[in-house]
Image: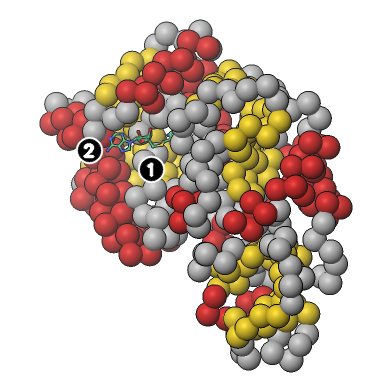
């Protein structure tokens, strides 16, 4: 096995079990091996960790274990079994769409596995994770016998490491474009072929349930609607009407399909830029009872944070201005670099500018099928604040 020798004083993160090794910490390497497996040793020669290398990434290795044990099929089978057991305890009834493996959050670096009923959609985000494929594929086949397995490769991180970006069929008959599944008894279709993530925003499941529980009798505006899933949940909860706004026709078509699957007719679909659409609604003096703002990640990197916050402020300021007193706003951000404290400041500035009072009722994130390891807080990204609008300030 190849060994990466760490620079003196640059082994603290690995000793604290952080799974990422940055290139700047490596003094040199020794040993042989073509299977991508590497281990870390301190300047004094002490064993620290073992995992897979990604030589073309700034994160040159990700650690799969900090014990001096083999990284083999048995270890990965154990990790997958642990991950699956966690879901059995936390995934709600009548639900067969959820995240089975959440990468570092399940101690399987760079590996994402989403289940849509009898289909597993897998992402291997790094070269190391790709090299580990025989291990995780075997483990998934054992834990989910008979499942179709699709590897979704259209990822910026893969392109950056020179890995293939065409989707692959790893088990099953044919590459499906869509996958049906259930969430709390509702039916949904994930867009595997050309969709976002692995085809659906499974991370918002518990927040969809929140909307469902508070939707009765409310008129709901679902901004950046994509699959329309928030609107499907709202109508299931007794919303009187739902309007979706998205700039993508394909997304609106997916939303139409999801409403049809649930026999829901009270939804309308607006193809527009949300910022322009909101300004027009405010100018027209509209009011709404429940608004969801769930834009794409405005900030992917630290350098985008300021611009991103202007976007979040704009969209939530306009949404708050549209809410009737006592109305509810579910304000979401999936930008990792915009943390919860900063997002709260953005909502404060939005309410101040809108000239309304606002109270935070709940601060939420992704569901428990998206666990975050305390060793790797970088895995946290989703914020969803439930806000109640008061009167005019
Ligand atoms: N809320 C969705 C996920 C949102 S993904 C869900 O629960 O499934 C972000 C969506 O925003 C995408 O569908 C994208 O087409 C849309 N989008 C991005 N920028 C937009 C803009 N300026 N105006 C309208 N829609 C936009």
SS type, badge 1: loop
Image depth: mark 1 or mark 2 in front: 1
The picture places residue 262, in percent across and down from the top left corner, at 53, 12
Q: Counting residues from the N terminus, which is met first, the one under dot 1 or under dot 2?
A: 2
Report if the CB atoms under discs 1 and 2 are less than 8 Å apart: no
Badge 2, how many Cα within 10 Å: few under 14, some, many 20+?
some
Q: Residue pushed farthest left?
A: 283
Q: State the residue in front, 347 or 22.
A: 22
**Residue drawn at point x = 60 percent, y = 20 percent:** 180
Rendering quadrant holding ligand 1: top left
**Residue drawn at point x = 41 percent, y = 29 percent:** 226
Distance from mark 2 CB to nearest ligand 1 atom below 8 Å: yes
Distance from mark 1 CB to nearest ligand 1 atom below 8 Å: yes
Relative to 205, residue 256 above or below: above
Q: Which mark is residue 275?
A: 2
Q: Which residue is mark 1?
A: 296
The picture places residue 211, in percent across and down from the top left corner, at 49, 30
**Residue drawn at point x = 46 percent, y = 32 percent:** 195
Question: Residue 278 lies in what quarter of the image?
Answer: top left
């Amino acid at each position: 096995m190849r060994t990466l020798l760490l620079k003196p004083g640059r082994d603290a993160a690995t000793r604290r079990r952080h799974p990422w090794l940055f290139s700047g910490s490596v003094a040199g390497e020794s040993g042989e091996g073509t299977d991508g497996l590497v281990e870390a040793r301190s300047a004094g020669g002490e064993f620290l960790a073992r995992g897979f290398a990604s030589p073309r990434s700034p994160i040159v290795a990700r650690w799969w274990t900090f014990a001096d044990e083999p990284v083999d099929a048995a270890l990965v089978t154990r990790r997958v079994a642990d991950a699956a057991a966690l879901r059995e305890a936390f995934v709600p009834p009548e639900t067969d769409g959820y995240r089975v493996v959440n990468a570092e959050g399940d101690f399987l670096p760079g590996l994402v596995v989403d289940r849509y009923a009898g289909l597993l959609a897998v992402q291997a985000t790094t070269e190391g994770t790709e090299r580990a494929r025989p291990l995780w594929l075997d483990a998934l086949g054992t834990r989910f016998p008979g499942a179709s397995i699709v590897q979704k490769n259209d990822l910026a991180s893969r392109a950056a490491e020179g890995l293939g970006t065409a989707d692959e069929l790893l088990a099953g008959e044919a590459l499906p474009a869509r996958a049906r599944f259930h969430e709390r008894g509702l039916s949904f279709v994930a867009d595997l072929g050309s969709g976002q993530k692995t085809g659906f925003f499974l991370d918002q499941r518990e927040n969809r349930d929140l909307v469902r529980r508070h939707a009765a009798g409310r008129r709901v505006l679902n901004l950046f609607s994509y699959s329309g899933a928030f609107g499907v949940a709202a109508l299931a909860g007794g919303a009187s009407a739902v309007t979706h706004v998205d700039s993508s026709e394909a997304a609106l078509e997916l939303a139409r399909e999801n409403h049809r699957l649930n026999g829901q007719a009270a939804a309308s679909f607006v193809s527009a830029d949300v910022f322009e659409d909101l300004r027009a609604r405010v100018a027209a003096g509209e009011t709404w009872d429940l608004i969801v703002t769930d834009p794409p990640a405005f900030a992917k990197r630290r350098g985008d944070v300021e611009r991103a916050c202007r976007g979040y402020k704009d969209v939530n300021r306009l949404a708050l201005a549209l809410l009737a007193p006592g109305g509810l706003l579910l304000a979401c951000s999936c930008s990792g670099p915009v943390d919860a404290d900063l997002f709260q400041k953005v909502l404060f500035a939005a309410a101040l500018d809108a000239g309304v009072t606002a109270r935070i009722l709940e601060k939420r994130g992704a569901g428990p099928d998206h666990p975050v390891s305390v060793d790797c807080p970088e895995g946290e990204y989703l914020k969803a604040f439930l806000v109640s609008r008061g009167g005019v300030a």
